[in-house]
Image (tube, helix red, strand yellow):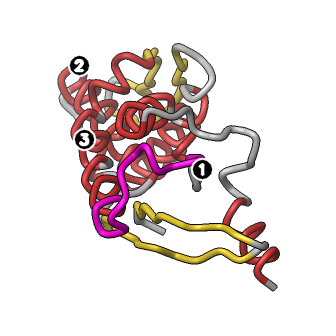
Amino acid sequence: MKQHYSAVLEVGDGVFEVLSTSGDTHLGGDDFDKKIVDWLASTFKNDEGIDLLKDKQALQRLTEAAEKSKMELSTLTQANISLPFITATADGPKHIEATLSRAKFEELCSDLIDRLKTPVNNALKDAKLSVSNLDEVILVGGSTRIPAVQETVRKITGKDPNVTVNPDEVVSLGAAVQL
């Protein structure tokens, strides 16, 4: 699902009250994957003269490798990408061997990171709150593990995001508490 939402909640007596929400339905984890896919495909096209984006099978492999490297870069400073036999020409098989640093990934995704700011700021504004009113920041969704995402939220709110909850499960946990 492609979306980034920010919500301001008030919690009391086990009840969650939504004070405001703001979102970008055209921003999600797959957008970060696509930045890596485009980088890999562009590099390959420059080196080999072949556009892998026109090859469905190659594109699928690029997408899987991009998602894997995005996840690795949440905990490591670089990801090694190996895609043997990504395509072939009359000269034989072609391969991709690349290293993507976290710094390069953040550079590729800088516009996406910037887009996170608007929903967060709008949610606070709509709730008529300032960052000083926040007790805690909880991030939801797998891509919130990206260090640049966490740092952006930290800069906006002045608070370290709570990392004790699993971002893949926090919505389900909240729903269970509400029942």
Image vertical order of residue 76 relative to residue 140, above or below: above
Q: Which mark is residue 166?
A: none
- Disc number lying in front (2 or 1): 1
Question: Quick check: marks 3 and 1 in contact, CB under 8 Å?
Answer: no
Q: Residue at x 60, y 50 (%)?
A: 138
> Residue 162, percent across and down?
65, 40
Q: Residue at x 33, y 23 (%)?
A: 91
At label 1, which amino acid type do we have?
Ile
User: In whole angstroms, how far apart are the C-alphas of marks 2 and 1?
Assistant: 43 Å
- Part of the protein shown in magenta: 124-138
Q: Residue furthest bottom?
A: 179
Query: 98 and 119: which one is in front?
Result: 119
User: In whole angstroms, how far apart are the C-alphas of marks 3 and 2?
Assistant: 31 Å
When asked about the image quadrant of residue 155, the answer is top left
> Residue 21, percent across and down?
40, 71
In the picture of the structure, the residue carrying the numbered disc 2 is: 47
Question: Quick check: marks 2 and 1 in contact, CB under 8 Å?
Answer: no
Identify the element where label 3 is drawn. helix
In the picture of the structure, the residue carrying the numbered disc 1 is: 138
Which quarter of the rendering shows the C terminus?
Answer: bottom right
Image vertical order of residue 170 relative to residue 134, above or below: below
Q: Is residue 73 left or right of residue 49?
A: right
Q: Residue at x 47, y 18 (%)?
A: 97
In the picture of the structure, the residue carrying the numbered disc 3 is: 114
- Disc number lying in front (3 or 1): 1
> Residue 75, percent across and down?
63, 23
Secondary structure, magenta segment, majority class:
loop
Of callouts 3 and 1, which one flags the residue occurring earlier in the amino acid sequence?
3
User: Mark 1: few, some, or many residues within 10 Å (few <14, many ≥20)?
Assistant: some
Image vertical order of residue 76 relative to residue 134, above or below: above
When asked about the image quadrant of residue 140, the answer is bottom right
